[in-house]
Amino acid sequence: MTVESPCASSSTSMSEETPLLANENGAVANDGEPKWTSAQLKQMYKRSAILPALYIGAFLCSIDGTIVASTLNRVGADLNESDNVAWVATAYLLTNCAFQPLYGKLSDVFGRKQMLLFASFFFGLGNLMCGYAADFNWLIAGRAITGVGGGGLAAMSSIIVSDIVTIEERGIFQGYANINFGLGAMLGAPVGGLIADHLGWRYMFSLQVPFVLLSSFLVFRYVNIKPKKQVVSNVSTLERIDLFGSISIVCFLTLLLLVINMQDDTRSLSSDPTLQIMSVASAIFLAIFLYVEMKIAPEPIMTKAVFGHLRPTLLTTSVFFTTITQFSVIYYTPVFLQVVFLESAAQAGVRLIPLSIGVSSGSVIAGHILKKNTTQRYPRVFLTGLTIVGLSCCVLSRLINSSTPHEFTALAATLAHHGVSLELVLAVNLAFQGLAQGFILVSTLIGLCCQTGAADSASSIGVIYLFRSLGSVLGVNGVAHILQSRLRAELPDILADPELQLKVRKNVEFINHLAPAIQIEIRNVYKHALSFVFSSCSFITFIAFTMGFVVYLHSRSERQ
């Protein structure tokens, strides 16, 4: 199929690369319903078989993260490694982020099915290793291998969906994918807890393997998507692999993430020689990567269709900033609820349900909005989402400053006078935050696909997932440094003992063991620090909004 325009509708001829379309403009039967050709019916059947294969893998990737997060303490206690248990999550995150950008370009070279099976193999192997890990080191190795596959399951499912549907349908199917992913994220914690309580934590990993095998069988049987750029010989295939670019970006991202994750109260970048050396090495690998991509690689990982033009570059960069905000809200709203509202971790988790529902709903709504006039509408949908996110973070910051069981603030009094609780306002605010994030997730992906075209869609999607991963890292770890710096500045005025200060900063539940009067003061310190965090998120969103507005202006001038 010849692609005339990245966002053009497909022709009526069918091939293995033809998007699986409804026959909207085809012949009409006597009853007024569109007539389907045998080729179109065959393609519709193939799509109905392909999507479950993709969604099972993405669901496993989603549920895996929250299953592990909910039972980390039990795993650490069982292996006598409670002080190092964070590396279970970090090992997965490192390899997931480092290998994610490779899948897009490699799937152009080797094929979609091959790379998806590659991801499934490593995801299943890693979980099997974790289930039978003899010690903590084997568990860490298993999680690292799982991360190699996990990054591919998420990215490849999105890439293949882009291959089998039109750009007009892409947003709707992204909405369905987000519902699937959100469902896995919500089920992970309770399912993980039940399995750990009744069977043991090892079964959390090993029970995923049969589902990986099922997904792999469906992929092997039904996913036969040809890359847009065809391979002419084995020699040309090897030459197309950006080996030096792949090695350098993996080294750069691994070192960068290690530097971010290894900083704590005892070591920082400004004082630790090891971290400084790693930072310099990371910068060197980044320089090598950029040189290889611009001067040497025949088919670079970071396709020039993304970073060679203004609008794709701005869209991709804005994804990084919006993901920082998204993960800051996800991780630090529960901290606020536990410290200020005195809720348990389980109760705080339930409070995030409106956020998850909002993301799923926003994704589907955005998909339907972008079904028509896609190129004209995606900048507006993107800006709408950013506006709501920025306002939501401002409201969240204001709520935190007005929310405490120990103070009767003016905002709380006004809301109470009108019969509205702060809890209800928080729930509605989180729902709108999720709705806006759904708008952003869909509009950025659709916008980038429109700008880069079908031939570079796989590489472009891989780049988007990379920037989301980097944004999630900084949204958790980077914002944690902001929070901790504020706490370090204010806690000495309340607690003279440095050891007590450290315990309060490391474990919010420790606050409950202090004297009531001290508790109130410490909770107020946390309240002010968290309010500053969400105010910072508003500023970060404004940066993304500025980029989105430039995209909107360029799109508008192009139409004129």
Image (cartoon, helix red, strand yellow):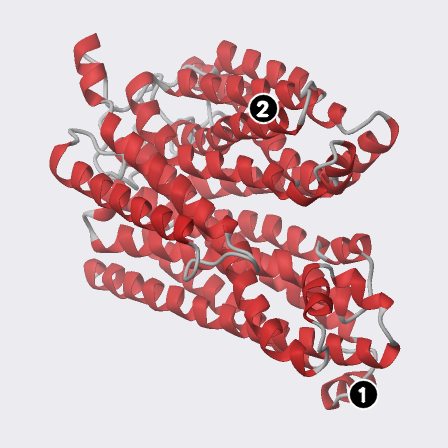
With respect to residue 284, does 28 lie above or below?
above
Q: Nearer the viewer, residue 56 or 505?
A: 505
**Which kind of residue does numbered mark 2 sit on?**
Pro
Q: Nearer the viewer, residue 314 or 531?
A: 531
**Which kind of residue does numbered mark 1 sit on?**
Phe
Q: Which quarter of the figure is the N terminus placed in? A: top left
Q: Nearer the viewer, mark 1 or mark 2?
A: 1
Give how far across and how far down residue 447 sits, in percent. Answer: 35, 49
Q: Which quarter of the figure is the C terminus placed in? A: bottom left
Quadrant position of residue 544: bottom left
Identify the residue under disc 1.
408
Give how far across and how far down residue 288 sits, in percent. Answer: 21, 40
Q: Residue at x 55, y 18 (%)?
A: 49
Give how far across and how far down residue 493 sits, in percent. Answer: 67, 83
Counting residues from the start of the chain, the first of labels 1 and 2 encountered is 2
With respect to residue 273, does 207 lie above or below?
above
With respect to residue 109, does 471 lie above or below?
below
SS category of the residue bearing label 1: loop
Whether residue 234 is visible to the viewer of this picture, yes or no, is yes
Give how far across and how far down residue 235 sits, in percent. Answer: 17, 11
- The number of numbered badges drawn on the structure is 2
Q: Residue at x 32, y 45 (%)?
A: 282
Identify the residue under disc 2.
52
Whether residue 454 is visible to the viewer of this picture, yes or no, is no
Q: Nearer the viewer, residue 192 or 113?
A: 192
Quadrant position of residue 74: top right
In this rendering, would 225 be left or right of 436?
left
Distance from the alpha carbon under mark 1 to that under mark 2:
52 Å
Crowd class of label 1 (few under 14; some 14 to 19; many from 20; radius 10 Å): few
